[in-house]
Amino acid sequence: MLKPIRTVLTAALFTIATFTVAAQMRGEHPDTYVVKRGDTLWDIAGRFLERPWLWPEIWQANPQIANPHLIYPGDVISLAYLNRVAVEPGPREAAPITGVPLAEIEPFLKNARVVDSFEQLPYVVGLEEDRLRSARGQVAYIEGMPDAQPGERYAVVRPTVRYTRLDRTQCCDIMRQDDLEFDGLVTMDFESIWTDIVVPDNGQELLGYELMQMATGTISRGEVGGIEASTLVLDDEGREVRVGDRLVPIEANPYDLQFFPHPPRQQFEYGRAQVLAVTDTMSYGGPRDVIALSVGARDGIDNGTVFSIWRQGTLAVDRVRVGSERDPTLVGRADRVRLPDEFSGHAMVFRTFDNVSYALVMDGIRPTKVGYELKHPDAPY
């Protein structure tokens, strides 16, 4: 059982850290705020701070707090003075609040993962009564599991997207995601939930394959008595399974439910960190939409990392210099002007993989599009 947080956080204004936090507080903040069910750290910090991603700094002002992040519905947050931040504990029946609305990201926490390869995974080689697609509660026959034992639990996943990066020396990198067939060939799969960005195939670096969970099941029989396939009884809940779908063990705790907003640890080279895809096959996304990013754990990205999202400035033809009648496709770089990048919004990472991460768009003044640039949340341009 978690101990109530009763320590008052008192920070002296003569310290640099406290002065920084105090300087970011909104002038119209109330004296107190009662945490409500459904609140997120981002929403609360947005009421009190100019920059919601600085929320952890308030609680970390005094390092003697055992776990300054745990805030519960019913807690009373005191902000009576700019140099005094306190939390009066309330009831502990509900779970602590998190950084993002869990309902918005639950499908991606439970059902999506990104891996370096999938060809080595066991796969569905046949279905009950030689069906093309299974129904709930039916059985699937699995190739590549000679040691499977009855009672073992597996998730049936489908490789749906290949993420790649094209490294360009003259400008910025180009990111891409391709829909896949079950054998790994690129195809147009209308069951995909992502948008697409098209670039040449040559010279691409593989960022990973996205596996989408279709169903779960239990092994009822292994490869015994001359049978060359294991039998998997599919659970009643889930989507249709087809030949070629892969199997992975069910993870007991595949994700972390605590997301504490914070800036990235480094500023990436321009063009390295971009929006790879937007959910629901849309060209643009907005607040509460999930986006895939071209950076992951190997780049120092973890849960709670906050980025600002920017539309890259275009190379506009200088019409005054070249004249209004000239064909823009024939105008070289010397007669173009690089325009500033345009701020779109903020996104917070909620699940990371080696080279790819998922983020939720938290706010925005314009839609977010595939290919937009990711920067430090405080980036001025």
Image (tube, rainbow, N blue to C red):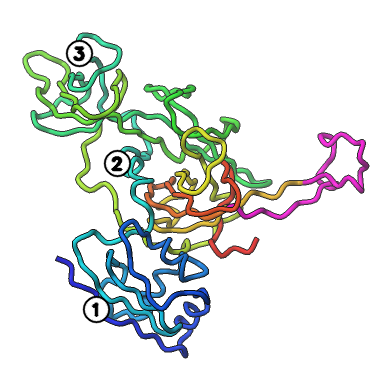
Mark 2 and mark 3 lie on one chain; the one further toward the N terminus is 2
What element does badge 3 sit on? helix
Q: Are marks 3 and 1 in contact (CB under 8 Å)?
A: no
- What's the amino acid at mark 2? Lys
**The image quarter in which residue 36 lies:** bottom left
- What's the amino acid at mark 1? Arg
Tell me if residue 341 comes above or below residue 129 in the rendering. below
- What's the amino acid at mark 3? Glu
Query: What residue is disc 3 on?
Result: 128
**Label 1 crowd bin: few (<14), some (14–19), many (20+), radius 10 Å:** few
Asked whether 105 or 317 is in front, the reply is 105
What element does badge 2 sit on? helix
**Label 2 crowd bin: few (<14), some (14–19), many (20+), radius 10 Å:** some
Residue 172, numbered label: none
The magenta span reads 316-344
Asked whether 371 or 48 is in front, the reply is 48
**Label 3 crowd bin: few (<14), some (14–19), many (20+), radius 10 Å:** some
Per the image, is 6 magenta?
no
Q: Position of residue 336 (x, y in %)?
A: 82, 47
Residue 6, numbered label: 1
Query: What residue is disc 2 on?
Result: 110
Mark 3 and mark 1: Cα distance apart in space:
59 Å
Q: Are marks 2 and 3 in contact (CB under 8 Å)?
A: no
Q: Nearer the viewer, mark 3 or mark 1?
A: 1
